[in-house]
Image (spheres, rainbow, N blue to C red):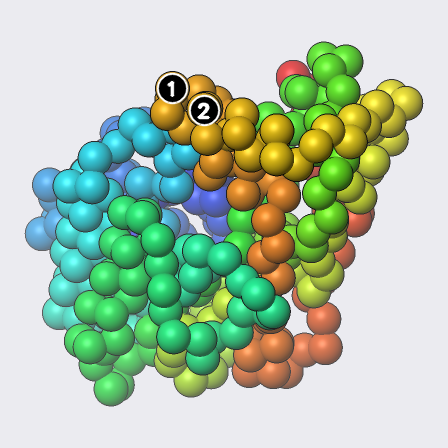
């Protein structure tokens, strides 16, 4: 197949290119003109009229969730909604038959009391979630009946050379600083990059109904278990402090006011409950389980981090 991938230079994009390029011809649409391995040709967003005919478009380009509050609401809107509108309109005019849009569980909810499913009434919080939801709604309202359109809502994606909270946590623990959040008992569902690649490849080759699908691992894991796993993989003795929760909340609020790396949003990411169901996508694909399991996939990511950072 001939594929067009937007956001190909990011963590998810480079992994998808690596996984799909041995079997498909891949074109990239990016703000960067740098050609990466596995991409046949790279186009700029100003060159939409020059894009070749492709079979499928995978839309990844986005402003990611910003716990440091560096981006304005307008910037989120211009990228997360504006670029999605442009590329989806192009898809509708083109001969491409498959559109895979990467949204986020943040478009559905900021916090989860039970387990998040696709039929939840969306209640995003903040510019990231609201612009992701607006993009979803635009796609859903303009989907041609003769084409296959999939909106994927992944939970936090991790894997080899990932960015975000996992390497931040690894750096913290590897430096010898004790983990200070031992008082929190929570469960979160993550998404291995290998499961992302598996689902995307499956959607390119298997016809399932268009719609919204959660994307995540089968298992959830507590932050305490994750910390223990990181310590063990790094070859260190676990050092966990059980500091009073109220003090932690106070420090996080101060971090938000002062624009520090440790703030309320990052605390919520590390210690809040956020369990997600992937039953809908597994049922549609006719599988019982995802190929990558959380424990082994996290160990692989940490080992890579340990060897290369």
Q: Is residue 244 left or right of residue 90?
A: right
Considering only vertical position in the picture, is 57 above or below 163?
A: below
Q: Is residue 189 left or right of residue 47?
A: right
Q: Is residue 156 left or right of residue 140?
A: right
In the depicted view, which residue is nearer to us: 170 or 27? 170
Q: Quadrant of the N terminus?
A: bottom left
Total labels: the figure holds: 2
Q: Is residue 250 visible?
A: yes
Q: Position of residue 113 (x, y in %)?
A: 57, 65
Q: Are marks 2 and 1 in contact (CB under 8 Å)?
A: yes
Answer few, some or many: residues within 10 Å of disc 2's Cα (few below 14, many 20 plus, some between 14 and 19): some
Q: Is residue 198 visible?
A: no
Which residue position is annotated with label 1? 258
Which residue position is annotated with label 2? 254
User: Alpha carbon of mark 2 to alpha carbon of mark 1: how far?
Assistant: 6 Å
Task: Name the image quarter holding residue 300.
Answer: top right
Q: Is residue 84 left or right of residue 229?
A: left
Indicate the secondary structure of the residue bearing disc 1: loop
Q: Residue at x 54, y 69 (%)?
A: 116
Considering only vertical position in the picture, is 308 above or below 208?
A: above
In the depicted view, which residue is nearer to us: 113 or 249? 249
Answer few, some or many: residues within 10 Å of disc 1's Cα (few below 14, many 20 plus, some between 14 and 19): few
Q: Residue at x 31, y 48 (%)?
A: 126
Q: Quadrant of the C terminus?
A: top right
What is the number of the mark on residue 36? Answer: none
Q: Residue at x 38, y 75 (%)?
A: 121
Q: Residue at x 59, y 49 (%)?
A: 272
Q: Residue furthest top?
A: 175
């Amino acid at each position: 197949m001939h594929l067009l991938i937007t956001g190909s230079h990011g963590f998810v994009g480079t992994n998808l290119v690596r996984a799909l390029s041995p079997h498909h011809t891949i074109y990239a649409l990016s703000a960067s003109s740098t050609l990466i391995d596995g991409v046949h040709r790279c186009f700029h967003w100003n060159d939409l009229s020059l894009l070749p005919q492709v079979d499928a478009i995978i839309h990844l380009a986005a402003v990611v969730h910003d716990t440091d509050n560096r981006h304005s609401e307008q910037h989120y809107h211009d990228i997360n909604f504006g670029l999605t509108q442009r590329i989806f309109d192009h898809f509708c005019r083109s001969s491409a038959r498959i559109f895979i849009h990467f949204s986020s569980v943040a478009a559905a909810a900021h916090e989860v009391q039970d387990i998040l499913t696709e039929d939840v009434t969306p209640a995003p919080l903040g510019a990231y979630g609201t612009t992701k939801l607006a993009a979803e709604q635009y796609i859903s309202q303009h989907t041609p009946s003769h084409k296959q359109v999939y909106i994927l809502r992944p939970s936090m994606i991790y894997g080899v050379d990932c960015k975000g909270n996992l390497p931040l946590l690894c750096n913290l623990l590897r430096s010898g600083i004790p983990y200070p959040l031992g008082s929190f008992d929570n469960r979160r569902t993550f998404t291995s990059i290998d499961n992302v690649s598996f689902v995307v490849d499956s959607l390119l080759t298997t016809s399932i109904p268009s719609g919204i699908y959660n994307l995540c691992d089968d298992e959830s894991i507590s932050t305490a278990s994750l910390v223990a796993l990181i310590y063990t993989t790094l070859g260190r003795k676990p050092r966990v402090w059980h500091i009073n929760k109220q003090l932690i909340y106070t420090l996080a609020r101060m971090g938000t006011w002062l624009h520090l790396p440790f703030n309320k949003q990052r605390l919520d990411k590390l210690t809040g409950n956020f369990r997600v169901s992937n039953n809908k996508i597994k049922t549609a694909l006719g599988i019982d389980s995802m190929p990558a399991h959380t424990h082994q996939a996290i160990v692989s990511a940490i080992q890579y981090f340990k060897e290369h950072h």
